[in-house]
Image (spheres, grey):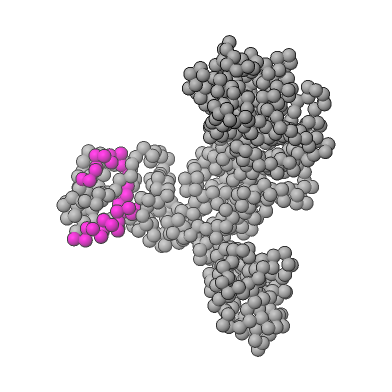
């Protein structure tokens, strides 16, 4: 590696050409980064006390992929964003300079021939900087002063327009800008492919400006080490189509999340968002993945990316499936995407019929919405969906989905019809996070001629105004204030109308009988209102009960006969290979047996989902997986808590860190329990491990 300090313009002038490899991310600087660079340039140009301004490094491969000569292009590993942005500034400046030269070396002709073009070269060698794909065509159009392509790079177009506007504001006073540009300094870092490892260097760099995304790192990891022809083929056949499918903006926003969902499907573990790259590297090195080869891996990622774009980005072409995915997006059911990706893959492989796939999507929607209405904490949903596939019996696909949902207990349960109807009638649904979603679903369920709900406004039949009129107070009765506070934002008092401003705070009878009133409304949500004589607490409750009854059809619970459910319950019960008596330290009459029985009772009482499994070396207590393991010993029970030691609150200091010590049991925390007086405190530690596992700690 050779690293030298250099003036940016001198570096551009002496270098024959910069080429951005296909595995590099596209040009991605936003106006924020462009404005920062512009401000730095203008500050340096204004202040004579600033002799130079450092803007970062440019790292490139000096040898290897191209024939080495004094005119060999340089393959840029880091610095694309700064180089491209500088080119945009120089191109914009050259158009303003005309025949003037406000500072030596800064004429339009010199800027173009020194820094933007290679005037003596032909073809692509005639340009100083070659970007990839869409970026390439847009930049070449700019520096040759031709119209930008219709499907060109949004970033290049927007940033060029930004610099144009900034230069325009200088009103022809361009010397400060030229002086600032002349003071820009970089570190010129030349790598030898024979002696340096570009991938390791790429990973270790923390560039100024826009940080590398997990997607950038993954793409480079997959493609960088391949031969150029292989790189090009994989990029052309798989990676570039993925970028196009996501879209210029969507790729940067959604690809990291997609890759996280994909890895959850493939590994059963949910990587942290900032650790997706590391999780991907581990996955790619697994024996079965590595033996299948990089082409197979990238092709599979491409296939799953198509599924994700269909579900999450509205790219589904099947109308019925597309509407179901739209409802999931409005409900914000991102946590279900790992499970849905597996279902979509089986649907594409003809292992799951279209109708059953659609039914499964609707069941997931109902499961999430019912839980939200019933205010069941959502922090375990990511793990519920990450492990859902383990319960599938693909020869009875939809049936096994239903059986698993019906078998979920406690905090993971599928709320039954009675619980759902009860909570739906009393919840504040006006301030619910997805109120347009539930109104649209209720209005359009099983309706071929769909009502565009977004064109209507939400109407409170009993007005929101705290200062109710005398007529409203009389109608609501002597407890009008309680009725107003209790039922204002609930299901029975909410509807849709196109006459919100006309209704205002009118009395109910006026809203009912006026032109365009409830009697004339074509909306399902308003059916029956025309026959109501007064609007009071009973009216609100009656309407809520009617709508809640309809809601159990819209968000239907799975139904299976008991005899079929019993077959799934029986499958779930594993015959124990060992029992407590197989542990000599827990034989009847031993001191530790009595203490263990007390501990066992307390742990199993934490939640109905907790199960016990007796193994040869220890007894495991599980929810999603083991959260505490008990190793019986002669004078104590040694407990392994499955959570990071540094996250445990242990004011008495009973626990110890056993990370990487190779103990029996799962977890980094060890606690000894010797007598009954310690049990209450130890249960407090165990509860932390249980809640850690149930919490949404993957983020």
Q: Which residue is drawn at the image coordinates 78% and 22% (left, top)?
A: 71
Classify 616 as above or below 276: below
Q: Which residue is drawn at the image coordinates 62% and 32% (left, top)?
A: 53
Q: Which residues are magenta?
A: 478-506
Classify 376 as above or below 620: above
Query: Which residue is nearer to you in this view: 388 or 348?
Result: 388
Query: Which x, y percent locates residue 340?
Result: 58, 49
Classify 373 as above or below 249: below
Query: Which x, y percent locates residue 146?
Result: 59, 16
Q: Is residue 181 visible?
A: yes
Indicate whether residue 408 is drawn in magenta. Answer: no
Q: Which residue is drawn at the image coordinates 55% and 16% (left, top)?
A: 96
Residue at the far front in the pictured view = 49
Q: Which residue is drawn at the image coordinates 52% and 58% (left, top)?
A: 379
Query: Which x, y percent locates residue 538?
Result: 26, 59
Q: Quick one: quadrant of the N terminus? A: top right
For residue 68, what is the image quadrant? top right
Query: Which x, y percent locates residue 451?
Result: 38, 39
Residue at the far bottom in the pictured view = 589
Question: As drawn, is 272 to the left or to the right of 430?
Answer: right
Indicate whether residue 501 is drawn in magenta. Answer: yes
């Amino acid at each position: 590696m050779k690293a030298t300090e250099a003036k940016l313009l001198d570096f551009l002038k002496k270098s024959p050409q910069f080429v951005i490899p296909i595995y590099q991310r596209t040009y991605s600087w936003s106006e924020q980064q462009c404005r920062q660079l512009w401000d730095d340039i203008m500050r340096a140009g204004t202040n004579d006390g600033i002799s130079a301004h450092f803007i970062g490094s440019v790292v490139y491969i000096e040898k290897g992929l191209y024939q080495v000569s004094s005119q060999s292009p340089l393959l840029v590993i880091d610095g694309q964003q700064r180089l491209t942005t500088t080119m945009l500034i120089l191109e914009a400046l050259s158009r303003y300079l005309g025949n003037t030269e406000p500072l030596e070396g800064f004429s339009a002709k010199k800027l173009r021939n020194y820094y933007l073009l290679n005037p003596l070269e032909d073809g692509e060698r005639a340009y100083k900087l070659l970007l990839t794909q869409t970026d390439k065509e847009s930049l070449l159009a700019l520096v040759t002063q031709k119209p930008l392509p219709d499907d060109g790079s949004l970033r290049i177009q927007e940033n060029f327009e930004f610099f144009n506007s900034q230069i325009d504001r200088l009103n022809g006073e361009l010397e400060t800008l030229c002086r600032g540009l002349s003071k820009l300094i970089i570190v010129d870092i030349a790598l030898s492919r024979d002696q340096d490892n570009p991938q390791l260097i790429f990973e270790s760099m923390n560039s100024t400006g826009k940080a590398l995304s997990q997607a950038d790192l993954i793409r480079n990891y997959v493609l960088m080490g391949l031969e150029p022809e292989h790189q090009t083929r994989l990029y052309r056949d798989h990676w570039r189509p993925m970028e196009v499918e996501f879209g210029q903006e969507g790729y940067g926003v959604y690809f990291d999340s997609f890759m996280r969902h994909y890895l959850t499907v493939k590994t059963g573990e949910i990587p942290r968002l900032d650790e997706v790259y590391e999780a991907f590297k581990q996955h790619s090195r697994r024996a079965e993945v590595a033996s299948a080869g990089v082409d197979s891996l990238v092709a599979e990622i491409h296939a799953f990316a198509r599924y994700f774009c269909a579900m999450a980005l509205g790219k589904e072409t099947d109308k019925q499936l597309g509407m179901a995915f739209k409802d999931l997006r409005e409900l914000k059911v991102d946590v279900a995407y790992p499970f849905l990706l597996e279902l979509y893959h089986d649907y594409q492989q003809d292992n799951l019929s279209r109708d059953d796939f659609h039914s499964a999507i609707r069941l997931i929607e109902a499961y999430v919405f019912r839980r939200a209405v019933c205010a069941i904490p959502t922090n375990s949903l990511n793990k519920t969906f990450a492990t859902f596939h383990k319960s599938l019996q693909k020869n009875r696909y939809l049936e096994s989905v239903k059986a698993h949902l019906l078998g979920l207990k406690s905090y993971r349960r599928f709320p039954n019809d009675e619980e759902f109807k009860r909570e739906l009638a009393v919840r504040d649904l006006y301030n619910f996070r997805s109120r347009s979603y539930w109104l649209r679903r209720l209005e359009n369920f099983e309706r071929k001629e769909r009502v565009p709900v977004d064109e209507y406004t939400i109407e409170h039949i009993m007005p929101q105004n705290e200062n109710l009129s005398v007529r409203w107070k009389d109608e609501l009765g002597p407890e009008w204030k309680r009725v107003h506070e209790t039922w204002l934002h609930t299901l029975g008092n909410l509807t849709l109308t196109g006459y919100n401003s006309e209704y205002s705070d009118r009395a109910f009878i006026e809203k009912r009988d006026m032109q365009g009133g409830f009697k004339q409304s074509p909306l399902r949500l308003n059916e029956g209102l025309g026959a109501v004589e007064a609007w009071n607490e009973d009216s609100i409750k009656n309407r809520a009960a009617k709508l809640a009854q309809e809601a159990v059809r819209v968000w239907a619970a799975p139904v299976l006969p008991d005899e079929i459910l019993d077959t799934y319950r029986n499958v779930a019960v594993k015959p124990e290979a060992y029992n407590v008596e197989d542990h000599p330290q827990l034989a009847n009459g031993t001191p530790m047996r009595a203490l263990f029985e007390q501990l066992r009772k307390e742990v199993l009482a934490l939640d109905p989902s907790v199960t016990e499994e007796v193994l040869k070396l220890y007894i495991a207590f599980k929810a999603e997986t083991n959260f505490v393991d008990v190793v019986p010993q002669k004078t104590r029970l040694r407990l392994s808590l499955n959570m990071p030691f540094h996250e445990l609150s242990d004011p008495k200091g009973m626990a110890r860190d056993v990370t990487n010590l190779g103990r029996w049991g799962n977890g980094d925390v060890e606690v000894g329990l010797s007598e009954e007086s310690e049990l209450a405190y130890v249960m407090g530690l165990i509860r932390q491990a249980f809640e850690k596992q149930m919490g949404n700690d993957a983020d």
